[in-house]
Amino acid sequence: MGKMRGAIVVDNERCKGCEVCMVNCPADTIAMASEVNGKGYHYAYMEKPETCTGCANCSIVCPDGVITVYRVKA
Amino acid sequence: MGELRLMKGNEAVAEAAIRAGVDAYFGYPITPQSEVLEYLMLQKPEERTGMVVLQAESEIAAINMVYGAAGTGKKVMTSSSSPGISLKMEGISYIAGAELPCLILNVVRGGPGLGTIQPSQADYFQATKGGGHGDYRLVVLAPASVQEMADFVDKGMELAFKYRNPVMILSDGLIGQMMEKVELPDQKERVKEFDQSWVITGKTKDRERNIITSLNLDPDKQYQHNMRLKEKYDSMSDDVMYETFDCEDAEFLLVAYGSSSRICQKAVDEARSRGKKLGLLRPITLFPFPDAIISKLARQVKGILSVELNTGQMVEDVMLAVNGRVPVYHYGTPGGKIFSPDDVLKAIDEKLMGGY
Amino acid sequence: MDIKEIIKPENLVHQRTSLMTDATLSYCPGCGHGTVHHLVMEVVEEMEIQEQTIGIAPVGCSVLAYDFMDIDMSQAAHGRAPAVATGIKRLWPDKFVFTYQGDGDLAAIGTAETIHACNRGEDITIIFINNGIYGMTGGQMAPTTLEGMKSSTSPYGRDLQSMGHPLKITELVAQLPGTNFVTRQAVHKPGNVRKTKKAIRKAFEVQREKKGMSFIEIVSNCNSGWKMSPNESNVWMEEHMFPSYPLGDMKVDGKIVKDLMKDLV
């Protein structure tokens, strides 16, 4: 079985910057942006995109449903 | 002619509900109206028409079951007596706010508090001025016979759906408990089509989702909602109902509803036999109140007596309709004591005709 | 591999269910309410029962649940959701009817409606969010507030002597013959989210088979009310809420599967 590569797309404007995705990311992919969105929240982004495995943990714990997850076999 | 039976007022309501194709009744026992639930249970309405009858854990639960079920567009009703109706008032306010149709029977007993189980008309204010919190009105029907207890079930449902508003039958322990001949309506089919513009029966692909709510956090929206409700309540005057007895040449007028009106009818007969030109106006709808006819009669008569089983409630609406044209008095007995025709005649002499 | 190669429709793993509306959730950042909303709608989507599902929104933070779920819904007076659901379900017995309630709504002002709907075995699903506080009104003491826990109406901590004990209503309803499936879950971690989703699916299946009440308590956070960051609140929840409200199934297929008395004491 090959290594999985993943990527997330965050709806920046809907993200409330709660950081729940960040602590639940097993690959340490996610961090909070230094910029803020229109509501003033530091939104989530892939700080280390190369580490993402597309496990979707971030997406399923996201209370606001702002994360879409993609995955391929590398 | 329909089927004739000798029945209690409470039983007549229950039988009429089955025959009107009412889909559900949710209630809780309280004297003097428990016969409604008892009769329904005995009749196995689930076999006769498929009607759902459920004894709830409380008055509060019962009215909220009505609220839920009414949101699905079906014909739903409940019944209770004064203290129980007070408990239901929060739910009734929600039903009015969410604009749902339903029928509520109040077989009034004496109050305040636990009061007495005897007949009373002390819930007039509560019924006609809303009763719960917020700016709303119920359509209020006041039956004066067992026949009207039966007839007002279907009539009430019709008005409830016409206005998408709760309708109250404001009866009392006398009419609920007494037995009279009643002509029962024929069996109606239960409705199978529902107005998909507002009912919650599951969102289908061909429409937007429907929401039953009375919440408007935006004050502008709440303002619009209240103003639209007011328009609706104003339009209800189209359905005002009343009866007049011996009013054509009357010099003095009684105004009485429900059981009081029956006692007053006897008093009018007696007064007429003594040569006194007395008439009676019986409001059948207490909301909308028949103020136009009272205003008209106020140009004709010398004085008006509002006769009620309370310390003076409807008299205020009579005064508003009369608007100072002639003196308006109140006569009544509270606390479950019923006046006789002689008591009314005495009050007429003392209060109404005393100065003439 | 370039990110653009990964972000393609055919590689999609997880996204927001289409049964959630476009409205932005009114909940505080990190609040479990949103997670549970998504799960309920995911289950409705997967079971393809949108046309048969009716939800009841309570009074509390989730009063506006009907703004977020793309299904027919009714708002209910405070605590009365199980009675409202009863009225709907009795008239439409083949629909899926669920209530969505908080601890104050379900276990304080609505205790009678909760107990009696469970005891009658109404074929409805109750989704009960327990965060030990009144969130919407600003963090007052709830029936499930823990001993010693501070709130705006127990500013020195809940004193059992004068304020009574935390009410473990889920352990109570599990003992009623009308309940078929009773469980307590959480949604703060991916594993818990997956278990909660399975529980919601099971609850709706119980409803389909008309086996009686399905009751899911979800122990959740209220970071605003608890005055913590979202992640701090989730850690605090594990350390303090879970010992009093232990996770797991209590009743499955009408059989009690846990030593409820042990958890009650």
Image (cartoon, coloured by chain):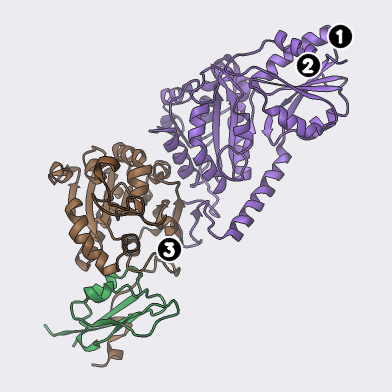
Chain colours: A green, B purple, C brown
**The disc label shown at residue B351, or none:** 2
Where on the picture, by quarter, is residue A12?
bottom left
Q: What element does badge 3 sit on?
A: helix
Residue picked out by circle 1? B275
Quarter the C terminus of chain C occupies: top left
Amino acid identity at mark 2: Lys
Of circles 2 and 1, the one toward us is: 2
Q: Is residue B3 left or right of residue B31?
A: right
Residue picked out by circle 3? C68
Residue count near mark 1 (Cα–Cα under 10 Å), binned few <14, some 14–19, many ≥20: few
Above-or-below relation of C150 to B33 = below
Q: Is residue A57 left or right of residue B324?
A: left
Quarter the N terminus of chain C occupies: bottom left
Q: Residue at x 18, y 60 (%)?
A: C239
For marks 2 and 1, give the CA distance.
18 Å
Q: Residue at x 54, y 25 (%)?
A: B112
Q: Chain of mark 2?
A: B
